[in-house]
Each structure stands twice: as structure tokens, then as C-alpha cells.
Image (cartoon, helix red, strand yellow):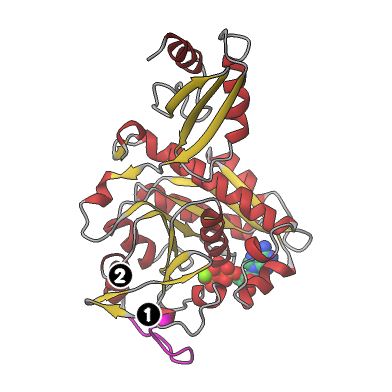
Amino acid sequence: MSELKERVMQALSTVIEPELHRDIVSLNMVRDLEVSDGVARFTIVLTTPACPLKDVFIKRCNEAVLGKVEGIERLDIRWDAQVPTDRRIQGMMNVPMRSIIAVASGKGGVGKSTVATNLAVALVEEGAKVGLIDADILNPNIPQMMGLGSGRPKVINNKMQPIEAYGVKVMSTGFLTEPDKPMIMRGPMLHSAIRQFFVDVQWDKLDYMIVDLPPGTGDAPLSLAQSFPLAGAVVVTQPQSVAVADALRAVAMFDQLNVPVLGIVENMTGEFFGSGGGEKLAQERGLTFLGRVPMAATVREGGDYGRPVVVHGRDTAAGEAFVQLARAVAARASVVMMQTANVIPINIIG
Ligand SMILES: Nc1ncnc2c1ncn2[C@@H]1O[C@H](COP(=O)(O)OP(=O)(O)OP(=O)(O)O)[C@@H](O)[C@H]1O
Ligand SMILES: [Mg+2]
């Protein structure tokens, strides 16, 4: 390495990753450094393409180098991302995904499927490869919310092919049954249905698999957590105290199952249900508050007509809230994964 390059690297090694609390050079986030004509060009490899901290990195890198390293007048930073890989997933045949995130709640109807849908779509928009499993086997809502109401998966070589919408690869029992026929299943059948959605579906390589759970602390979250290593769970609640009490039960369940709770989302904030219950719960339990989504007709219509608000109403308050939420979830998942022993650290991710 040229002497100038070395001095730039040294300066960049004073830049601390705000959430991992280590410097970006020893985390091996700085790649392909070139210097010429007073410009230092390099790539920062983030732990998620949906990183909310790009501006912080730009500011800190500039502060660390400009005026400190003689001969460098400008930085030209490019971005790349490698989502940490849970190495426990890798041993599972045909499950090529880096991290699995469940969306859960205590109470029904609080907006899990809406959050799961918009979260998945927003992560695609940020540049991630994303799958969405509808683990509400008996009452699948994801096909309608993704505009895939009449979808039927193809089977190739005994593997079901997921159906794609808004760049998200989707699998749901809604694709396999008639809308007016009830699904009648016992616990063990539910368990094997969820398992099949992971192992018998032809998933491509995915950064994130989002799993929409049915409400409550029943069989589905238990099956999921026992069969597959979850990066964590996002717990959705409405602001009012009845919903918050149920959310607390969901949090306690994930604690018992040793699944990290990535944080709390407060949905349907507004005049009707009030505001603040989700944030208060997060504070009281020492959990991350991931964000709040306002009650808005555009969100409901987006679900009814298969036009997720994060795409079709991106510039509305609710659309913007979902973009921020997706970034917060992705950042939190990276931090939580990097803190566990099960993860292949960023510096050896290929
Ligand atoms: N922020 C919001 N503003 C307005 N309507 C919303 C909002 N979030 C969700 N909804 C609507 O509320 C209803 C319930 O949402 P959703 O189906 O996502 O909840 P759920 O928690 O998945 O329900 P279930 O427990 O039955 O699975 C839907 O009609 C949805 O469109
Ligand atoms: Mg639902």
C-alpha cells in the first residue's frame, strides 16, 4: 500500500461504527481504497443495504480525513452491503437465506400482515433480496395484500416456486386453497406446513426472509422458533393498553424461546387508538422502539387492493413511516446478529 493510502486507512480507522462500537477498518468495512489527484475513493461495506446511517458515515469519514491527511481534498465513497449470515441456517438444505425475521403480535388485527408486507417491499426498495412467508396458515392475508390474489405457484422438480410481487418472493397457503374453503388443521399439520414453506420451496439467495405470523403465542411462533434460527422478532402493537398487554405476552414468549426481540412497532397511532403505548412498552422492557405508523386510510386501501402504501403512497406520512421502519429493523437485525456467536462476521463474508 502506498504511504498516502496507508495514512488514509489510518485516519479512517478512527471512524467508529455507531452501533457496533468498533472502528470501520477493523470491521473490514473499508474496501478498494484508491487515491489519486487529491481524491480518496473507497467502498464502505454496510451490514444492510437499508442502512439508516449512511449520512453519519459520510460525515465522520470526511471529518477523519479532510484536513488531517495531507494531500487528500475530497472523499468519493461508494456503498455495498453484506447482510450478516446466520451460520445455523447454512446447514439446512435448500434454505439459502441470510437472516429470518418474524413479525408477531399478542393481539389479532394490530397490523402484522400490513407491517410484514410493507417491510418486505421497503427492504427490496433499499436494495435487499427479500422473501415473505405467510405463516398465518389458516387465515392467509399476504396474497391479497401483495396483489397476488389469484396466484398459483408452479412446481418444478418437486419444488414450489415462490410468486413474486414488488420484487418480493412470496409463499402462502392462500396460493394453494380456495378462498371460500376453510383450512382445517391441527397443530402438527401447521408445524409441517410452516416447515415446508422453508425447505420445499425454491428460494433464491435471500438477505431477509420475513415471516408473517398469526396472532398470539400459539403453535405457529413455537414451530417457527423451534425449527429455524430466527435473527429476531418484530412485535407489532396498537397504542392502546389492551393491545400493549398482549404485546408484552408475545415479548415474554420470545424471551422464553430465546429469540431476540428486535423491537416494538406501534401501528395505527392516531386519534382513535391514541399514541405512545408501544414506545412506553419498549422503554419499560429495555427494548428498541422501531417506530410508529399512523392510522391512515391509504394503509388499509393498500392492503385491500394489493398496493402496499410504501410503494403507492411513499410520500405520505404512513409510507415514509414504513421506509424508516424498514431501515430501523434492518439495522437492528444486523446489530443483534453481529452480537451473537452464530453469525459469520462481516470480515469473512464472501
Ligand atoms: N396503519 C394503519 N392504518 C389504517 N389501517 C391499517 C393500518 N395498519 C393496518 N390496517 C388495516 O387493519 C386491518 C388489520 O391489519 P392486518 O391484517 O395487517 O393485521 P394483523 O395483525 O395481520 O391481523 P391478524 O391478527 O388477523 O393476522 C387491515 O384491514 C389493514 O389494512
Ligand atoms: Mg395477519
**Horizontal and vertical percent position of residue 254:** 40, 51
Which residue bears the numbered disc 2? 201
Q: Is residue 257 above or below residue 1?
A: below
**Horizontal and vertical percent position of residue 42:** 49, 28
Q: Does the CB distance between marks 2 and 1 fall below 8 Å? A: yes
The quarter of the image holding the C terminus is top left
Q: Determine the residue located farthest toward the right in the rendered image.
A: 271
Which residue bears the numbered disc 1? 153
Q: Is residue 323 above or below residue 184?
A: above
Instruction: Give the CA distance from mark 2 to mark 1.
Output: 10 Å
Q: Identify which residue is drawn at 29% across, 40% down.
A: 342
The three-letter code of the residue at mark 1 reads Pro
Q: Identify which residue is drawn at 60% across, 50% down.
A: 325
Q: Nearer the viewer, residue 55 or 9?
A: 9
| 182 falls in the magenta region | yes
Tag 1's secondary structure?
A: loop
The quarter of the image holding the N terminus is top left
Q: Identify which residue is drawn at 27% across, 44% down.
A: 87
Identify the mark at residue 347; answer none if there is no mark.
Answer: none
Q: Residues within 10 Å of mark 2 (few under 14, many from 20)?
A: many
The three-letter code of the residue at mark 2 reads Val
Q: Can residue 108 be seen by looking at this rendering?
A: no
Q: Which residues are magenta?
A: 175-185
Q: Mark 2 vs ligand 2: CB under 8 Å?
A: no
Q: Is residue 155 above or below residue 12?
A: below
Q: Main secondary structure of the magenta part?
A: loop
- Res. 181 image quadrant: bottom left
| 151 falls in the magenta region | no
Q: Identify which residue is drawn at 46% across, 12% down.
A: 10
